[in-house]
Amino acid sequence: MKRRAFLQLLGASGGGLLLSAKAAPAGLDVGYYLRIWPDNSMLFTFTHFEMGQGVATAMALVFAETLGVRLDQLKVAPVASTADGRYTLGGTGGSNTIKNQYQPLRRGATLARQALLAAAAERFGQPAATLQVAEGQVRDPASGRAASFGELAERAVALAAPPATAAEFEQRKPELAPAGAPSAGAPNVYADAIVRGQHPYGLDRRLPGMLVAVLARSPRHRGRLLRFDASRALAIPGVKAVFRIDGAHEAQRGVAAPATRFSTQDAVAVLAENSWAALRGREALQVEWEAPAVRAGGEDTASWSQHLDDRLASAQPLLERGAAVSGSSLEARYDYPFQAHLCMEPMNAVAHHQGTRAEVWVGAQSPGWWRDHLSTLFGIPVTIYPQFAGGAFGRRYYMDTALEALRVSAAAGNLPVQVLWTRSDDIRHDHVHPHSRQAYRAQLDGQGRLASFAHTETRAYFGDASGEIPWFAYDSAHYRYAFAECQSSSPLQGGAWRSVVANAWAFGQECFIDELAALAQQDPLQFRLRQMASGAPQAAGRRYQVDQQRQRRVLEAVARLSGWASSSVRGRGIAAYPYLHGDSYCAMVVEVARRDGAWRITRVVAAVDCGRVINPDGARQQIEGGIIWGLSAALHGGLQLRAGAVVNSNFHDTPMLRLHETPERIEVHFVGSPEAPPTGLGEIAPPVVVPALANALYAATGVRQRQLPLTLD
């Protein structure tokens, strides 16, 4: 298939592939996830969400290694839409994509490989077991003959019809082909298009006759629209209409899972021919909002902080084992504040409500769930066309963007509409990382071991009576965890943010463990290892167990790799924490030194156990990116509240990590077994780097910083 024809087909399908007999010869579905053309062009279809984390490349590598092709022989594209019943579009989050899809991808590639081998065996008159597969060909060593996959595809399908549905695929259990040697690494399959500005994102989506809308939303969560004057907005050239859009509060609609709750605000939509006119029209609006009732949590940063103290006092135990004992004790509180996502590509969605059906083009971390829920809300079939996204890490799990766009499209007379968010919209109406305040109290026995460890937390979002228990790796004769939710009184809508609950847990726990090491007058590394002498798994609620031996392994590795025992660096800190959603473990050492009157991060060393590493290049980038993400939150994160609304508005008051603040060296080492299955990677680094930095700053200055943002000055 010619490149131009392929790109035309790719562009026509919203990022997937829409076959047209006129545009190119028909390809054939072989096995599962794979389409092959007669000229040996091949398309690998992936079912999860690419938001810059490189999951498309990793999935394609797993598939290619098992199938017997080079990665550069595969075109890689997402499933075109949720209407494609052959595939199930899985949710992307919790560092679970490769962990959960590793075996299905190998099964799909094995089905294709077996079918192609059967076709080649028939052609060559040789047993399939004697044939060799490499680089998109099947070879017969006895005769020297070879046939490409493209030549074999039609007969392969005739001999072994591929699964027609996801359910049928789940019933196929072939003996898996060998996984092949671990990959030496591969660049992102979209890297060339990205650096050339040619990679399509949701913001690039255009439909014939499409109009553009921006929304003026209530500045306060669940504030109500009283009235508006659109006369000045309608006078702006290009503005077509201005109308009201009612908010939706899905947490009140019986949606059970906390991760699926979302809200949209009451809003005024400005519909225009282009984005410039729509933005100018919104600036010209005169809008009056009715504020919601004053919440128990207060209306500004100070009153919210006082409310958190009140909630801590009301926390109820969710887990207690052993009996409290006396001994030398220590208490401390740690704060991880609200955090914005700061996606490089602000939120957006294109929707076309057509009366009896609807279509939405949007970057979605759970498109299948969006389709089903939106279909229920609107009472019509809804098709989602997943788009590539420039960042998300939890934010695009929530369908407020699609819901707004569909409502605007319907109100506009069933016209196709693109709803755009500005950077300020993104920050002030985000589904923010929940604020967590944590109180710790511990006792040490006469040998400097944990005799009691009590952890009390109040957290906005991701918490209720059956919530998760912190992932605590250490031995303690007594352990107690108490919790109080504060989302119901929060002035902000909570949501998923990279590494979710692990961020606050790791920050508080690993800094407090450092405080206990100082109390015991022990080296921070040796103190941690002494508290894991049993080697026994530690229960963490109903769902998880912390593997103490894997936690020890990454700690010992990072100590060795950083030169912990021999280093003369004074300003260094250590921390370790698992990410049990993805079943991985990480430890880090951070070093700081004085530069130009302030402390600067000179070195970060990370040891990571994520099982088999699929793509070393991408894996290393995930850890490096996670370190930068975590440091941005540590040094600049946190949202300020005034009169119930977010004060922050852009990168000037919510900056990302600056170049001069970036670590001078980042060293990433993978220490898991290559024979183990792959586990999650995307969310392991941010929780660990923050306490490691805080501990390094204490070592350098003698001052404990127990709340974010930390200061280097």
Image (cartoon, rainbow, N blue to C red):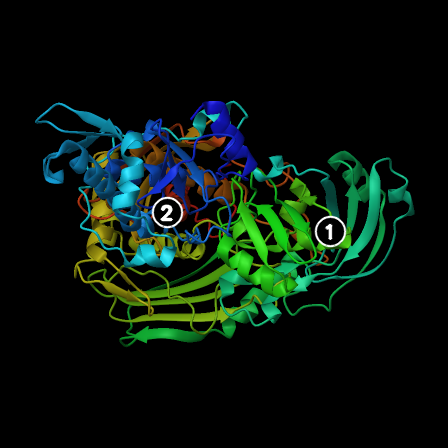
For the residue pair 181 and 112, the one nearer the viewer reads as 112
Q: Residue 414 got which mark?
A: 1
For the residue pair 601 and 111, the one nearer the viewer reads as 111
Assign a secondary structure to mark 1: loop
Residue lying farthest to the left in this orientation: 142
Q: Is residue 139 above or below residue 159?
A: above
Q: In the image, what residue occupies the spot 56% across and 72% down?
A: 254
Mark 1, residues whose alpha carbon is within 10 Å: few (<14), some, or many (≥20)?
A: some
Among the 4 quarters of the image, the one containing residue 169: bottom left
Assign a secondary structure to mark 2: helix
Look at the image and tell me whether residue 373 can be seen: yes
Q: In the image, what residue occupies the spot 35% across and 73% down?
A: 319
Q: Residue 523 got which mark?
A: none
Amino acid on which the number 2 mark rests in the picture: Val
For the residue pair 155 and 190, the one nearer the viewer reads as 155
Look at the image and tell me whether residue 597 can be seen: no
The percent position of residue 537, horizontal first and vertical second, equals 22, 62
For the residue pair 686 and 15, the one nearer the viewer reads as 15
